[in-house]
Amino acid sequence: MATRQVYWNVEGHHWLYLFFIIALVIFGYGVYKRVKLWKLGQPENRWKDVWPGIIDVIVYTFAHKRILKDGYPGLMHASIFYGFLFLAFATAIITLQADFAVNIFHGWLYLFIKVTANLFGLAALIGIIVAAYRRYIQRPDRLDNKPDDAITLALLFAILLTGFVIQGARIAVLPDPWAGYAFVGQWMSIPLKALLNEAQLLSLHVFLWWLHLALAMAFIAYFPYSKLFHVLLGPLNQFFRNRGPIGIPEPIDFEDESLETFGKSQLLEFSWKTLFNTDVCLRCGRCQDNCPAYLSGKHLNPKRIIQDMRVLMEETGVALQSQNKVLAQAAGQEAAAASESEETEEWTGRALIGEVIPEDDLWACTTCRSCEQQCPVFVEHVDKTIDMRRNLVLMETRFPSEAQLAFRNMENNGNPWGIGWSTRADFLTGLGVKTYEEDPTAEYLYWPGCSGSFDARNQKVSAALVKLMQAAGVHFAILGNEEKCCGDSARKLGNEYLFYSLATENIEVMKGYGVKKIITQCPHCYNFLKNEYPQLGGNFEVIHHTVFLLDLVKSGRLKLSNADRKTVTYHDSCYLGRYNEIYDQPRELLKAVGLDLKEMAHTGEKSFCCGAGGGRMWLEENEGQRINEMRTDEAIAVKPDYVGTACPFCLTMIADGIAAREVGEQMKALDVAEILEKAL
Amino acid sequence: MAKGIFIIVEQRNLQIRKVSLELLSQGRKIADETGEPLVAVVLGQGIEELAPTVTASGADKVILIDDEKLAEYTTGAYTSVLNKLIRKEEPQAVLLGNTAIGKDLAPRLAQRLGVGLASDCTGMETDPNSFLTFKRPIYAGKAFAHLTSNVRPIMATIRPNTFPVVAPDAARTAEVVKEVAEIDASDLVAILKEVAIAASNRPELTEANIIVSGGRGMKGPENYGILEDLADVVGAAVGASRAAVDSGWKEHKFQVGQTGKTVAPTLYIACGISGAIQHLAGMGSSKFIVAINKDPEANIFNVADYGIVGDLFEVVPLLTAEFKKLVNE
Amino acid sequence: MNIVVFIKQTFDTEAKIVLDGNGKIDANGVNLIINPYDEFAIEEGIRLKEKFGGEVTVVSMGGARAQEAVRTALAMGIDKGVLVSDPALEDADEYAKAQILTKAIAQIPYDIILVGRIAIDDGASQIAVRLAEALSIPSISSVLKLEVAGTQATATREIDGGTELIEVSLPAVITAQKGLNEPRYPSVAGIMKAKKKPLKTLTLADLGLSAGDLSPKMNVNEFSLPTPRQGGRKIAGDAAQAANELAKLLREEAKVL
């Protein structure tokens, strides 16, 4: 029967349990120290979605869903991950066999473990070598190197290598009829046998066995003090992920008179989950690699923000500890224990906003969420930025002056351009569209948004959509002059107060008319009406115009010709794609009219922001390249006739980019609705 | 019995400002209609040489108040002098240009005299019942108010470029009177420390009859040369839209628009300007608007009297050549 | 230092102007804002207080809705507000309003009075200077930069084509021109605090005035609306042809060249 003697040639292997306990204690202490740091943050309940959490861990950890989206490092990581996972399984079996008298390590299980341990171990070893090669030879921009990286790689490499050499040494001495299953060990044994005699092999074997053990114990002890901690924290963070409206912090209840601060300026005002976030991040850099601000030369770097917050968290921990020490010395143990549970005093260390994170970084973010989308461990960056913007706007009133104009305009006239509110309905009523006041029985509320109502270029999109809906016999009406800005620009820039007043007014008007279903052409309005208005009591069925139009086409209510043989490339809007996972419907529409669809370099989940999100449409771009021009360059590379968009901001930004690059003769930016209208 | 229409003539460095000539021209018409004498009041130092110009522009009488304390305008001195003069002479009406000086002097003087003031008027006509009636824009020109007064003197400031300047008549004669400046020491409270006027041979933006203005379509500061060439052929001022100023191509003092200067020239030529509402707010009351823009859908074409859809870099130099031909005819 | 800021609540710049049945400007449904030039005055007042200590009071005249304007000023950082509200205000001209303000300010100690240089609704820019005259104190209008030292104020004033530097002893009236400062955005904390700051409302009777005292010197007889501007024509042809045609039209049709 296939088996081998466990712990052959090793005396006193039970000592390993002592070392194991020591390692565990060090491990435990490390975890305790970190947990203590995280608990400095505010309470937040992230434990409630148990089953979705477990499913997320299965999908994102065990099935490596996001990790594999980046092929090269993804496969590399998978081989290390599955390698070690399997080796851990193998070790567990051996432990059961050796010290728990569970007699299973024989027969097919033995052979299975022999072969897979070698296979996965080899994969892991190759993975580590590739990782080291990538990090130290290829040196991609997104990786920064710290001693921890080298130590971890060296440690894992050493553990794997010693493992194989041990196996090789044993095979070199002991006849093993099933050695072929341990093919790596067998290959190892050949040079070993050639170079060393039996006595030497035995000594080597014993030495390496204890070394391997020491390294493994070191691994366990080092675990919470190093990036290895992500092995535990990553899945936990996937479990804890935000399942509510994404990219936005909690709403503020302005009716609450007891509130003294709005937004967050101190690290400890954030919840424990934020602090936890900073430890989960292992500097893989995928966020940085996909951040439009970073790639266009702005100082903002999402990886750095999270890491800098981590350093601040540690500084805070140290400062509090010494504070408590001082208090303990001054007033005895009791007082110290009492003060540990009190609120921290005024923080005199580095300021979170300004010193740790420059204010410009906070404003440079377009809230595109590519950072969050690419992050394999689900670090959440964007809502922190908005929370800090809230502090700057609502408390400090320190923000780009262009934003003040946009705020004033929204306050006075319900749109960021400040065009007279009483002219909002003019364009659409000019097309014959009725308001809800005139036609209260309309089935759908058509929400053109500020762009669709006021902006000359986007009015054409509204006109196209109206024509399509009329052709399909859709019964719709608009709110007309009673419609106000959805509040996206206000909220994303941190002006929660202005958002609150705009949103509550809009909700009241819509409820007053009994609105149930809303069609909108703007993904920002779509995102707000659908995902964020419920926070304030507004619950409506919201449909984006591309989804709606596709339905009309599929059901035959809208007949389009498919004769257009031009080439089109579709630009995924951040708020439609990453925020709401609508990627396919606009593409299907474009194909339905016969267009040849080509994709840009960054597409779908990795779509490159046009630069206007996060209220940046209203701000000046002063540093580096213009984000919209970079995106236009990607479009130009594909040589399309049209660039298809489904968002008024994207349309404006790409049209601007086309003008800046002077390729207006070769290509045009068009909304999907406009393209469809041509095919009516 | 109140007599005379007083025009407070504004001069700087012994140059009479164009708006004063406009007022004298229109004042002459009113004087002829009503039979009231037209009196020009000039304050300053060494201003005697200005009397012939003022006479040729239509004054029946010229009152010169020459004093070193009046060499540069100060609110206190000018108010003091004019208050005493007007109380002595009792004119029917006192008119000033709505310039920086007019805006500062007129209200103070009106309050001291205890009378009303119609400011920034764009229309003035005789009226059988109240001698003069005024029209002035309110709400940035979105409406007009029509005013009269029963109190004497009637005071008003008139917006530059409202009335045409008639050709001077050198044959005209007028009575020239010198008055002593009576200034209360208590009025000399403000000390004028320095005056800084930017040198320019082009007319001031708010005074210019013709303005050539460039916007985002200019693509850069170095390209304003073609606009300046066009402006210089017809003696126009050069302006800019907010987009150009924000991009640093032109200083803010050239900005025309809601957050810049409001202008009302006879002719406004907008080059590479889209015509956003905020820009229109600053030049919408121009008499004639010409637009040159590559984009046929640009909003400016909705308010332009004449529009050319084309590349301004092509059109403007050609237009300069055409204007040169006309000017030389 | 005692600082007084005078503000006016006006129609929003985008408001559509229509005449009501009586031929008066219709204020129904119109969005009201603080006169933008008065915001520079508010900001300067708060900055002076931040620099020299003391108190800033905001004074305004208007109807019930004007309270919003005063509260916004308080939210920006002004300490107390005074609102003169009376139906007789509607027909008051600039002379009368200056008289009213003189009385309203009589109870408030002032070292400096700050006002916007012009109100965007009537565009008359008279009241601040009239007030200075009525109080027999100097005024400097259209100020781009203000420096205060002790009892002296030095102001850079905008004139046609340039600037002047003027020195004056306080108390004085300063009217603010665009560019004097960047008005701050009221913080939410400021908005909450403003609800509790003192706002006194006064009628003409409280000031010892009656409607008769305010007979206007200048009468507004009627309001009219301008004729809407029509979009004109686009001149056809290539650049050379169009330029030629335009020059011809400007000379012969528009007669401007």
Image (spheres, grey):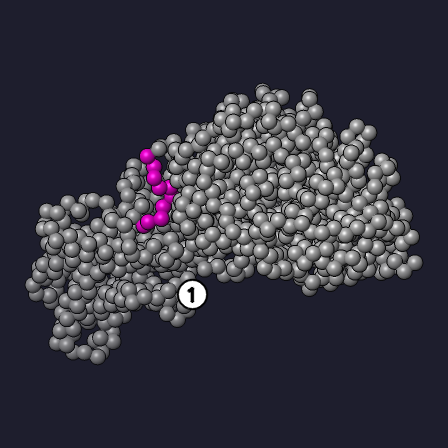
The residue lying toward the viewer, choosing from A486 and A594, is A486
* Vertical arrangement, residue A96 with respect to residue C34, above or below: below
Residue range in magenta is: A258-267
Q: In percent of the image, x 28 and y 52: which residue is there?
A: A347
Within 10 Å of the Cα at label 1, are there few (<14), some (14-19), or many (20+) other Cα atoms? Answer: few
Q: Quadrant of the N terminus of chain A?
A: bottom left
Q: In percent of the image, x 53 and y 55: which residue is there?
A: C154
Q: Mark 1 sits on what residue?
A: A140
The residue lying toward the viewer, choosing from A492 and B132, is B132
Q: From the top left corner, tell me how far across and down residue A539 is, in percent.
A: 45, 29
Q: Quadrant of the C terminus of chain A?
A: top right
Q: Secondary structure at mark 1?
A: loop
Left or right: residue B309 versus residue A539 is right
Left or right: residue B141 versus residue B314 is left
The residue lying toward the viewer, choosing from C157 and A418, is C157
* Vertical arrangement, residue A153 with respect to residue B299, above or below: below
Total numbered circles:
1
